[in-house]
Amino acid sequence: MLDTLKKGWWLLVLRGVCALLFGILAFVWPGITLAALVLLFGAYALVNGLFTASMGLRAPSGTTGKGMLIFLGLLGIAAGVLTFFYPGITALTLLVLIAWWAIVTGIMEIAVAIKLRKEMTNEWFLILSGALSVVFGILLIARPGAGALSVIWIIGAYAILFGIFLLALAVKIKGFAAQAHGARRMA
C-alpha cells in the first residue's frame, strides 16, 4: 500500500487542491444558490472519487487496501453522479447525502491509515482527515436545520482542512518516495 501511495502521491496533491478550491469557493460566494451548491458538491465528489479510484486501480494486484481505495473512489463517483442526475433534491436530502458520504469516507480513511501503521510512521495525517470527515458528517446529521450560510461555511471549512491534511500527507509520502529512490541509487 505504501508503494502505491509513493507512486501516486501526486493524486493526493490533486485531491487536496480540489478540496482547498472547493472550500475557498464556498467562502468566497456564501450566497450561492442550492442548485450551484449541488453542482459544486457533485463535481467535487466525482473528481475526488475518480482520483481515489485511479490510485486504487493503479495499485499492484494483492496490495493491502487496494479494494478499500477502489470502493472509496466508487463511493465518491456514485455520490457525484447521483447529485448530477437528481439536482432538484431538497436541502435536507443533500445534507444527508453529504453527511453519510463524509462518514463512510472518514471510516474508510481511518481503516486505510490503520493498515498503513505497519508500513510507515506518522500516518496520523490520514487518521485526522478521516476523523474530520466523520465529525463533519455527524455534525451535519445533528444540525440539519442550520441555516444555508452556516452549512456552506461548515462545508467550506471542512474542505479546506481536509485539503490541508491531504497535502501534508502527500508531502510526507513524497519524502518517503525520495528517500527510497535515494537509497536505491546508493545500493
Image: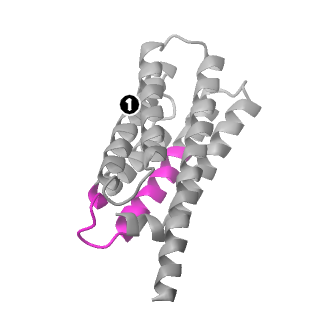
Q: Say which amino acid is labelled 1.
A: Trp
Tell me: 20 left or right of 92: right
Tell me: 53 left or right of 18: left
Q: Is residue 18 above or below residue 37?
A: below
Say which of 66 and 70 sits in front: 66
Pick out the residue farthest to the top. Answer: 145
Tell me: 122 left or right of 19: left
Say which residue appears at 47% left-offset and 14% top-offset.
144
Task: State the residue position of label 1.
Answer: 100
Principal secondary structure, stretch drawn in magenta: helix
Pick out the residue farthest to the front. Answer: 186
Say which residue appears at 31% left-offset and 45% top-offset.
111
Pick out the residue farthest to the right. Answer: 28
Q: Quadrant of the N terminus?
A: bottom left
Pick out the residue farthest to the left. Answer: 62
Query: Measured from the top left, where is residue 132 in percent x and y?
Result: 48, 33
Reply yes or no: does residue 84 show up in magenta. no
Reply yes or no: does residue 58 show up in magenta. yes
Query: Measured from the top left, where is residue 136 in percent x and y?
Result: 48, 27
Query: Measured from the top left, where is residue 135 in percent x and y?
Result: 44, 26
Mark 1 Cα shell of 10 Å, populated few (<14), some (14-19), many (≥20)? some
User: Magenta region: which residues?
Assistant: 44-67
Say which residue appears at 42% left-offset and 46% top-offset.
76
Q: Secondary structure at mark 1?
A: helix
Q: Is residue 107 above or below residue 95?
A: below
Q: Is residue 85 above or below residue 4?
A: above
Colouring scheme applied when the structure was drawn: one colour
Say which of 141 and 13 sits in front: 13
Say which residue appears at 72% left-offset and 30% top-offset.
27
